[in-house]
Image (tube, helix red, strand yellow):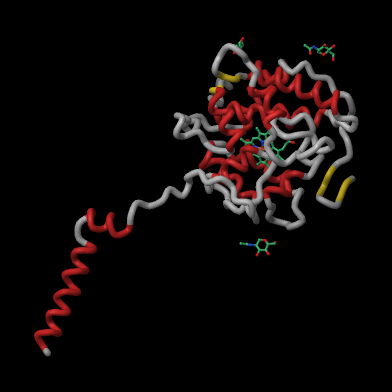
Amino acid sequence: MALFFYSLVFAAVALATAKDGGSDGAASNHGPQPDPHQFIAAKPTDLRAPCPGLNTLANHGYLPRTGRNITVPMIIQASLDGFNAGVDAIQPFAKFGLLSSNDPTTMNLDDLKLHGLIEHDASLSRLDAALGDSLHFNEQQFSTLANSNPGVDYYNTTSAGHVQRDLLAQSIRLNPTQTNSPKEFKIRTRESAFYLSVLGDPLTGIAPKKFVQIFFREERLPIQEGWKKPKTLITAATLGALQTVIVANANWTATQACETEILGPALTL
Ligand code: HEM
Ligand SMILES: *[C@@H]1O[C@H](CO)[C@@H](O)[C@H](O)[C@H]1NC(C)=O
Ligand SMILES: *[C@@H]1O[C@H](CO)[C@@H](O)[C@H](O)[C@H]1NC(C)=O
Ligand SMILES: *[C@@H]1O[C@H](CO)[C@@H](O)[C@H](O)[C@H]1NC(C)=O
């Protein structure tokens, strides 16, 4: 009886030692840790935005993959971790976006489709709200950007300005309720500075076409294709410098003054 008892204890100790001992044993018992930032496409129950940037952060787990209950500080931290975008570049957009939600402190990503807040006509990859689905990626709409800057394998501030010019002309042609005030133009050219910076170089504004296309089409960081998070912090100043060149290449004139202020889903001024 006593012998049996001691054998049991010995066996248990031996087992525990084997488990905790070598690193090989530990690895085979627990397996490799899954990367918390691996790409996982959104499930049908997950919510996404009209913004490829926020969607990519959610698809890589920098933001909640559900796309729900997202705060301004969460967006600021996710943008820094995922894109090396600093607080002064992100905070104004994030605070503005919070107005799209009925909750005082959180938003769901699909709240951001609220037309006239940030969401605007003449987008790079979404239809005008009056013409169709302004929330999800649209390959036809994206073809203007996809086919821009022919002959080279990168987009830059010149091509980004030309794309803005051409998409605005298309939107004015197709959409009888088109809105093109200084506000939309500022937001649109800022967003173009964003994709050149995140997928390319925040100082030169040169971004490989392949990376930009994967970002828009799949809302995925093209890590396996060779993309690396920018070493240069993306700031309001770096975005502004690129935006100035994009603006200069967009041949823009307002077709109307600033419109009604949207202050929430059920409040305009
Ligand atoms: C984190 C860095 C971000 C990047 C790289 C980024 C990038 C972009 C780009 C490239 C677009 C243009 C999409 C298109 O025209 O088809 C866009 C649109 C948009 N972004 Fe972001 N964005 C970022 C952060 C934010 C934040 C913080 C908000 C607000 C909370 C936001 C809200 C929007 C909205 C509502 C649109 C739709 C505009 C439209 O096309 O009508 N974005 N973003
Ligand atoms: C998210 O917000 C909803 C509605 O405000 C709330 O019912 C829910 O409990 C929240 N979920 C989490 C995980 O905080
Ligand atoms: C962008 O690329 C095109 C095509 O190579 C080139 O003509 C243009 O000068 C470039 N723009 C900038 C700002 O370098
Ligand atoms: C630039 O804008 C002017 C005035 O809106 C227009 O007449 C001209 O055709 C435009 N140029 C290009 C290249 O789009």
Confirm whether residue 70 shows in the render: no
Image quadrant holding the C terminus, namely top right
Q: Residue furthest bottom?
A: 1
Query: Residue at left 12%, top 79%?
Result: 7
Q: Where on the picture, by quarter, is residue 112?
A: top right
Q: Residue furthest left?
A: 3
Asked if 252 appears above or below 82 in the picture, the reply is above
The location of residue 45, given as percent across then percent down, is: 64, 54
Confirm whether residue 87 shows in the render: yes
State left or right for residue 49 relative to residue 175: left
Query: Residue at left 12%, top 82%?
Result: 6
Q: Where on the picture, by quarter, is residue 94?
A: top right
Query: Residue at left 56%, top 14%?
Result: 152
Query: Residue at left 74%, top 18%?
Result: 250
State left or right for residue 118 relative to residue 71: right
The location of residue 193, given as percent across then percent down, is: 64, 27
Q: Where on the picture, by quarter, is residue 240?
A: top right
The location of residue 179, given as percent across then percent down, is: 85, 31
The location of residue 123, given as percent across then percent down, is: 74, 31
Asked if 250 appears above or below 186 in the picture, the reply is above
- In depth, the one of 45 and 237 nearer the eye is 45
Query: How many labels, in total?
Result: 0
State left or right for residue 44 relative to residue 166: left
Quadrant of ligand 4: it is top right
